[in-house]
Amino acid sequence: MPLPMHTHEFADGAALAEALARAVAADLRGAIARRGRARVALSGGSTPKAFMQALSRQVLDWASVTVLPIDDRWVHGRHERSNERLIRENLLQGEAAQARFLPLYRPSPSPEAALLPVLSRIANEALPLDVAVLGMGEDGHVASLFPDLGLDTPGLREIGLQPRGRAPALAVRSANAPEPRMTLTLSAIFTAPSVYLHIEGDRKRRVLDGAAGDPRSTLPVRALLAGAPTPPALYWCP
């Protein structure tokens, strides 16, 4: 039996972006009403740009919101491939610029060298999350948790993909990624009561459905679906 998801299908990316922005904003308003603050972690790539722009236009107490990347390449925050830059340019605009931003990148030669201070800051200032919005690559990776995770470092895959653990972040390297990266682990992502999976395109949907329906799958997205405390909400369009 395929793993469960709450599926929302849309005709195009524009409709999806607006609907996802409304859903995430509602979650953030609820968290602010309960605790006076809200925390959201967002994935990068080209797919979420329209969603981030739509979210920036939502009416929120943005000064009470903390935003961080789910993962980032180990490049300066102004680099064209930086998820920090993507979030700043597409979300943290207008009223949303009042939100607090927690970068994963630090001025260090490698993510491994910066791991301890990043772990401390995430644990103390970012968790628990209220919302996590993930994408998925065509190879089935989520965050920067790639299928070859742990190939060169035994145990790294287990740390990154276990649903409950003490390590909220990992420094990772992959043959499929030109730069080293820093990423949240699934145990950190699962602190969010609202987890969204934002996917566009038929090819990615086939990868997702294949992983969801195959108990032998070792793709990271299968670990996401299998380990999530509540089924993630899939927002998809062709």
Image: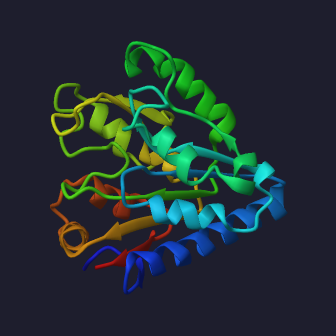
Question: Going by the image, does 49 lie left or right of 238?
Answer: right
> Residue 76 location in percent, x, y?
45, 26
> Residue 193 location in percent, x, y?
59, 62
**Which quadrant of the rendered structure holds the N terminus?**
bottom left
Residue 178 in view in this figure: yes
Task: Please tell me which residue lies in front, 90 or 199.
Answer: 90
Q: Residue at x 17, y 60 (%)?
A: 217
Q: Residue at x 67, y 32 (%)?
A: 124
Q: Is residue 155 above or below residue 62?
A: above
Task: Please tell me which residue lies in front, 160 or 203.
Answer: 203
Residue 164 in view in this figure: no
Q: Residue at x 59, y 58 (%)?
A: 131
Question: Going by the image, does 11 lie left or right of 150?
Answer: right
Q: Residue at x 38, y 46 (%)?
A: 162
Residue 176 location, quadrant = top left
Residue 235 location, quadrant = bottom left
**Which quadrant of the rendered structure holds the C terminus?**
bottom left
Question: Going by the image, does 214 lie left or right of 90?
Answer: left
Question: Going by the image, does 155 lie left or right of 135?
Answer: left
Q: Is residue 142 above or below residue 51?
A: above
